[in-house]
Amino acid sequence: MKKALKTTGKVLAWFFGLLFGFLALLCVVTLIWGHMQHIRGSVTENLPVTPADFTPAIRIVTFNDSHNQNDRVADAIDTSYALFDGDPVYAGVDAFVYNGDFSSVGFEGDYEAFAETYKAHVRPETPFINVIGNHEFKQSYYEELFRKHFNQELDTVTEINGFTLVGFSGRRSLTEWTFTPGSLKWLSDALRQAEQTAGGKPVFVFQHPHPWGTVYGSTVWGDPQLNVIFGRYSNIVDFSGHSHFPMSDPRSINQSLYTAVGCGATRTFELDNNGIVGQHPDGYDLAAEICVVEADANGAVRIRGYDLNSDTYFCDYFIENVNDRSTFAYTYKNMKAHDSAPVFAADTKAAAFRNEEGEWVISFNEAHSDFIVHEYKVTIKDADGKKIFSKNFIDDYFVFDEDDTADFRIGADTLTPGESYTLSVRAESAYHLYSDTITLPFTAEQ
């Protein structure tokens, strides 16, 4: 018995030693990759602007993560046609690409409802390329359901107007978040063949998870296997979802070895707060972002984000040369150089009121930055100078409306009606630049 226990102890020691060794190696690789992301590239005087005479030779609309909210799928398709049917420069939509997670748990009813929706709204002449995500992987028979309801292969190569579109669903590996070696080989072979015929044009790639360590949200909701393949080709322009991190954050485009774009979501957003993911601030359920992708005859690429709720374009990126990494403008380093510390207006004021649920809400005029204000550090002190509340709040920069105030719930019992307080606020930008801390007096509403 003692011998058996001793043997078991050795096995466990080896197991945990290997596990901790792997985790340590992963931490080192993470630090190195992150460091390279932050220092790669050069700083330009200005960020690119799409030329006024830009003329598309192809237009693709891609979106993802509707999770059974098929009215958003219908809206995305109908809105796209409405936007571009009458475009005097280049009319129409050449393809729709869905980047996965139309389902919640991958049951057949989810497939049926999604297929019925897009088939009722997509015109027969417009290709609809479907890429599945990890939520479809939750059922072991996902391949059977996919072919039955979509009449497509899971992995596809589509040629449109001289451009190559690679749709990669892959196959579920040991987990629903990783791909099998065989499916990764398919991707590698498809990209190698596409590169041979690209003629200097971009190769558009669509898959569900982000390439790890590239766009906003990818360090948690990303797959490192993809970087090994994508990193060989500068002209890859990759589109992904999975994280639900908003495309309206400037970190959702990244150029290091290639171009990666995070396409937000069409159901709910997720964000991080000081690196802690899984945050769902007020307004997170208003996610309705689509991505419009265009390229001209020379291979220059234009990428725009569009919010379905407000009918607003919220970003416009232009890549003149996908083949020359030295010209990549959307590196972390260059984007941070063009960010600015948030600034509060001189007449900023604060107020406190109760909402319909009886919670206290702190409201103050928003700060402004060249990109976005990502979050606010808020501290409240009473009339005696005692700190009674302190928290970081994520700003609702992903909601496009005319409200120019930041409003944050702080609980039902934090304040006393009629009492005076002091609010201290510091704003933080997307690339971690900080405003001066301002101090604002206010009185809790009676």
Image: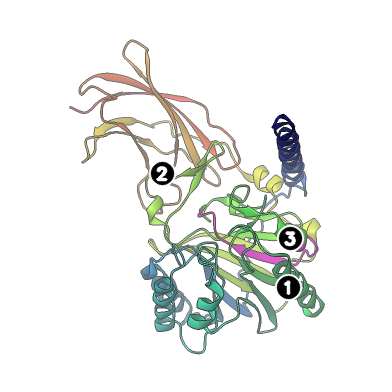
Residue 44 placement (x, y as % from top left): 73, 50
Q: Nearer the viewer, mark 2 or mark 1?
A: 1
- Amino acid type shown at disc 2: Pro
Q: Tag 1's secondary structure?
A: helix
Asked whether 240 falls inside the magenta stretch, the response is yes
Name the residue that disc number 2 marks.
281
Residue 434 quadrant: top right
Above or below: residue 274 compared with residue 333? above
The image's colour scheme reads: rainbow
Asked whether 54 falls inside the magenta stretch, the response is no
Tell me the CA gap for discs 2 and 3.
Answer: 32 Å
Q: Are marks 1 and 3 in contact (CB under 8 Å)?
A: no
**Disc number placed over residue 258 in the picture, else none:** 3
Determine the residue positioned at 59% across, 37% down.
432
How packed mark 3 is, by other alpha carbons closer than 10 Å (few <14, some 14-19, many 20 or more), is: many
Residue 105 placement (x, y as % from top left): 45, 63
